[in-house]
Image (spheres, grey):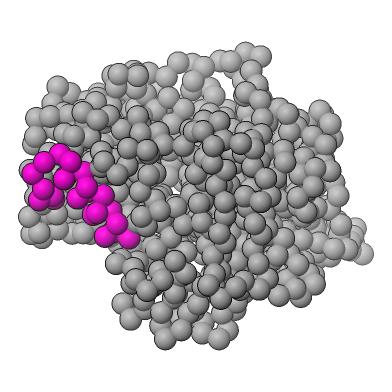
Amino acid sequence: MATRTTLGLTSVIAAGLLAGCGGSDDPPEDLNLKPSYLGTIQKATYDGVSNDLLTAGLGRAGLQAAAPAFADPANPTIAELRRNAIHSNYRALVDPSTNGGFGTLYGPNIDNAGNATLGEGKIAGDEYIAYADDGTGQVNVTLMVQIPAGFDKANPCIVTATSSGSRGVYGAIGTAGDWGLKQNCAVAYSDKGSGMGFHNLQSNTINMMNGERANAVAAGKNSSFTANLTAAELAAFNAATPNRFAIKQAHSQQNSEKDWGKYTLQAVEFAFYALNEKFGDVARNGTSRLNTITPAKTLVIASSASNGGGAAILAAEQDTKGLIDGVAVSEPVTEVALNPALTIKRGNTTVSRAGLGLYDTITIGNLYQACAALSSSLTASPLLAAVSPTLAANRCASLKAKNLLTSTTLAAQADESLQKLREAGYESDSDLLHASHFGTYQILAPFYANMYGKFSVKDNLCGYSFAPVTATGALTTLTATQEAQLFAAANGTPSGGLGLINNNSIGGPIGDSFSVSPSTNVADYNIDGAICLRNLATGTDVTTGQPLTGQALINSQRVRAGMAEVLRSGNLRGKPAIIVHGRNDALIPVNHNSRAYFTANKAAEGAASKLSYIEITNANHFDAFLGFPGYDTRLIPIHRYHIQAMNMMYAHLKAGAALPPSQVVRTVPRGGTAGAAPAITAANVPPIQAAPIATNQITFANNTTTIPE
């Protein structure tokens, strides 16, 4: 069972004296005082039987099974929303199939040593949740702290679990959250300012922190996200473009990525506060608690995967107060501008491009992936059917017509598009994954353009908007049930029934994949929109090479300013760190992220660097894809190595164990028949080596990182 309270908590008056000191830039000197940026804190206690921190009472079997039903689907309870959010988020980051390793290599029943000792994996404890805000109600980052019942105040530890992707506050529960709770650490979560902020502009309804839907006006500052529109602007927008949604990460007009590190550090501060509220020694006056659990006494590991891993790295770079002791992350987005004097080699071959930002990568992929999927060398691509052959062929022809390809036959255009991706820094190991990733890039390109440029939903940047769509691309409305369940079903991007709309399509607004481009008069996956988005990154018209002018130039300047805001320094302040990344990653390519960050860090910190980079062969970004035919036979779960990296970092910080040298880990695909690969075993996923052989060592010397072939 669960008991839930709203906390005034101690020392509220004293906390009020800290006004203006909010944020990780100046955390409270007394960690038993409520940080001024935190709003009302809600606390729930879970018994570990009927409900719990890690599985919401579902246990291993329940997480592996289909999503549980709601008693009243159109009116889900807060507890049901939490339960289903944990179910969907846990499964979103791992392969939930038994043959893929769930329940044998990882999962709630597997302890951090890799043994099936934990039964159903339910973990009792307390859960604290609150908004972090600047007083305007426009920020409202959701922070959460989970304290397992086994937490040892004499041996305190905290693990950060900032959400991956654009997910809500439970977005990293299956990765860093899982490891931290099993280690009896407090887990500090943050949705990093993205999360479940869905504003239905037509009905003016929004999400609350706990997932409930409410009227935006009635919710006021308690809304997770309400678009910054006057009543007149809202009415005009709805009249011109009905049934649209504003989504927090895209339309908050704050470029939340620049603050992912800050929000991660705030989650750590929240954890210290909650721990001292629970375990702190009572002072003489009996009204406040001493800082029993302090940074000096507490082991803190910044962790997570993907965007959450990038947030952990950024937090370590920005940590001026000594809150973080070490970093262990998987496939992080790093956003580092690599000095041209630095080089990356794979074997004896110099990487053509490295250190491009996320938006650059997305917009290049969005241009070329669909056409590249038709290459004769990629006929074995898993999920090849995700790309329409007709629309992809039209995209190839449109790329040629726009001077973005030179080849004259479809076959040659597809091969040329694939070569464009390789020249842009994608490894050939990613070739077979482009078909399955195009749809993701198609959505993320306008999503991130809006975020970086801090555009309002009313701007309809490059002609894009977000709305509910049917299976044939027609605009529709969400049912009451769909909208009520957004918190549990969506992932922070257009999802849960929402899709990407091309407002400029011939014939009127329609789902982007079904649209007809005005400049070509064909359905080609909206080449006009893709070019507009790419132009924002370059400041030029990519079809002519000429500089942009007028509003297009202004829009590009805004986006490029946002891209510059999120760059990392590469300086981890001497903190020990382990990064694991899959060589086959087609979403967050290694050359632009972990390889580039490792290189920048070694250049920035020199001999003081304590960063180990572990590159995993036959591993991609989406472990959740490993159950699909063709993925199952070719790729192994990178989550296995995230767990090992966490174990190694803990051993380093706790017992002084040496960090592993940077290395390539050579895994063994499961093979077999696509869709029926044999069960994975430990032999498929050999461990990170304490002393790798020379031919597997990753090195940095003479301004060059060398990755073994």
Frontmost residue, 326 versus 476: 326
235 falls in the magenta region: no
Quarter holding the N terminus is top right
The image shows a total of numbered marks equal to 0
Q: Is residue 666 above or below residue 467?
A: below
Quarter holding the C terminus is bottom left
Q: Is residue 594 above or below residue 535?
A: below
Frontmost residue, 563 versus 526: 526
Residue at left offset 32%, top offset 60%: 425
410 falls in the magenta region: yes
Q: Quadrant of residue 279?
A: bottom right
Residue at left offset 64%, top offset 57%: 686
Q: Is residue 676 above or below residue 351?
A: above
294 left or right of 614 in image: right
Q: Main secondary structure of the magenta part?
A: helix
Q: Quadrant of residue 319?
A: bottom right
- Can residue 143 be seen in this snapshot? no
Q: Position of residue 587 (x, y in %)?
A: 41, 49
Residue at left offset 33%, top offset 81%: 341
Q: Position of residue 674 (x, y in %)?
A: 49, 33
Q: Position of residue 80 (x, y in %)?
A: 66, 25
Q: Quadrant of residue 464?
A: top left
Q: Position of residue 267 (x, y in %)?
A: 63, 55
Looking at this rendering, what residue extends furthest in the top direction?
72
Q: Is residue 362 above or below residue 3?
A: below
- Can residue 381 be seen in this snapshot? yes
483 left or right of 688 in image: left
110 left or right of 491 in image: right
Residue at left offset 21%, top offset 31%: 391
Give the magenta range.
Answer: 404-425
Frontmost residue, 267 versus 653: 653
